[in-house]
Image: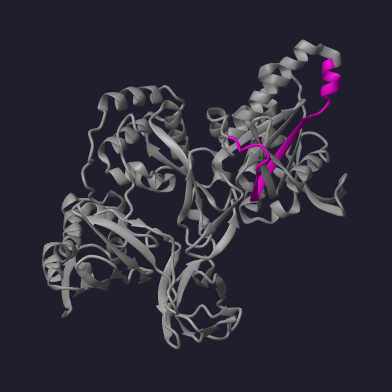
Amino acid sequence: MKPKTYVLEKEYAVDRQTAWQLLADNNRMNLYIGLFPVSFSPAKQAGAEVFYREAHAKVLGIVPISWQEFPFQWQENDSYTVERRYLTGPLKHYTLKVELFDNGNKGTRVKLTADFVPLNPLGYAAIWATGLPSVKKIMRYLDDYLASGATDPLEAPQKPATVKINLLELDRLSALLAKSPVDSSYVERLHQYLAGKGDHDVAQIEPIQLAKLWNADLDDTLRVLLYATKAGLLNLSWNVICPNCRVSKVEHSSLSQLEQEFHCDLCGVNYDANFDQFVELNFSVHPSIRQAYAEVYCIGGPIITPHVKAQQVIQQGKTALFRIPESEDALRFRVLQANDKVAVDEHAETGSLDYSDAGWSQDSVTGSDEVFITNSSSMDIVVALEHADWNKQAVTAAKVTAMQEFRDLFSSEVLSPGQKIGIDHVTILFTDLKGSTLLYETVGDSNAYGQVRNHFDFLTGHIARNSGSVVKTIGDAVMAIFNKPEDGLKAALAIQKNLAVFNDTTNEDLVLRLGLYSGAAIAVNSNDRLDYFGRTVNLAARIQGQGEGNDIVISREILAQPMSAELLASTDIELEEFSAALKGIDGAVELVRIRLREESIVEEQAG
């Protein structure tokens, strides 16, 4: 049968990046234009060709069809192509190419090229009845976006909710949420979001995207989502994300369901569930308010994998050109499934690469404008140009479990007994109340215990306000956790600055020693609480023991980090570098003692 090619072009008064974010968000766009949702099987490969996924759907909800869907190919903000080879139905083959061109000051010219190859005469009817109208609706999607007056792709038009929303229950639970310690404006925003957004957005609420939509602080957004979950407005889930393709491999409703190891068929790699790398938190509307599902239309598209800047299929013996975008982050090339990587380094001498069955021809390639890659292997390959550190886009389990609100609201959210989950980067704070033994001897057990409890509340307040949480108390000591070292340092500085005020208001004379250390740790279930163990925890405890009172002791590595150094670059702070032999730790450890000048404490007290 003769193929049919259709080309549609139109100019739009939007910038190229906005047009890209709209058209490359295939799940959202396809839902709006009314395409049928798709189910996908695990990746397969036939011969020397690249892998594909088998896709299954029903046209008009009645006629079943299936096809092989091959990896998307794209250059960010420029173009993308998707290819389908049909296994059943009246079509044999379909490709869609979306291209964006600058159109001077007028905006962006969008060009769609759709190629249909019918299998039989019914295929021509299918093209006219469903194929071509669907392509035309892509243009209409942009028209509707402009007509809506939206200024952000996250506010793109959506298909109305497919089920009735229980507004009475939404109002009741929103009123309950309003009694929580959250900003009332966030409660109203969430109410409007759950009532007005489409099914896809309320069935898969990503905190970072929601904070961006609201132009709000991420931690404030997270807090209202956590309290909303406790109030019954939302459900939370833990998605285990592949470290390479960023696609969710499995979703759990509880941390206790996490498994130690996972496999990604798309990337061909086994990996451990890591709290700060691969376990991501998401939310969804509670079914009592509305039944909503995040329907899937494609897997591995450009917006689903925003860390990938470009992706191409390179056939055997062929050479492909990649354009390197300007970026402050580290980039790399990676061969999908083989998982072979090579760094993009501006100091490298060559701008070309060769890939064979033995791997890449060198360890790095120059970060100049263009890189040529030749496939000398025995198979077709898929090469991605991507950010090496993509998890900045996600709210990880390491971040949210370090928040005091999470521990307070979801104390039962723990790992299963015996389960151990690694965390590559965590900051541990230990505090110690100096002279507490003498305190019990001089004022008696009851009064001393009351003073200790008051100081726990004082510490917890400053820890929570700096995105940390108290893991446990040990006698009169506190162990706290932070996702970022600068948050732990901010909390420690705030504690020592405000201790004098606390002592004055409580008529006490407490002296604190604080120790801070960052590194890797293991998250475990200890006495039905989420706890942390490992060398980092041991070092933090030992470092706190080096304190003399009214000081903070940190590792020199924390001081070397730019944000920490900026916090300590104050005339009100004295730094003393020293080495110490710590019990149970091999070799001397390089430490820094932080003291606040007397005038800074007085000023804080006066303020």
| Residue at 26% over, 28% down | 166
The C terminus, quarter of image: top right
User: Residue 26: in sight, yes or no?
Assistant: no
**Where's residue 466, x and y in %?**
58, 38
Q: Residue furthest bottom?
A: 317
| Residue at 48% over, 80% down | 368
Q: Is residue 394 left or right of residue 490?
A: left
| Residue at 34% over, 59% down | 298
In this picture, is 253 found above or below 28? above
In this picture, is 275 found above or below 374? above
User: Residue 482: in sight, yes or no?
Assistant: yes
Q: Which residues are magenta?
A: 414-440
Is 421 colored magenta in this rendering? yes
The N terminus, quarter of image: bottom left
| Residue at 50% over, 84% down | 378
**Where's residue 493, x and y in %?**
67, 39
Q: Is residue 545 left or right of residue 20?
A: right
**Along the line of sight, the residue nearer the viewer: 410 or 62:** 62
In this picture, is 209 found above or below 343? above
**Along the line of sight, the residue nearer the viewer: 361 or 443:** 361
**Where's residue 278, x and y in %?**
55, 52
**Along the line of sight, the residue nearer the viewer: 558 or 530:** 530
Q: Is residue 156 left or right of residue 326?
A: left
Colouring mode (rainbow / by chain / secondary structure / one colour): one colour
**Where's residue 247, x and y in %?**
45, 57
Is 581 colored magenta in this rendering? no
Rendering quarter of residue 22? bottom left
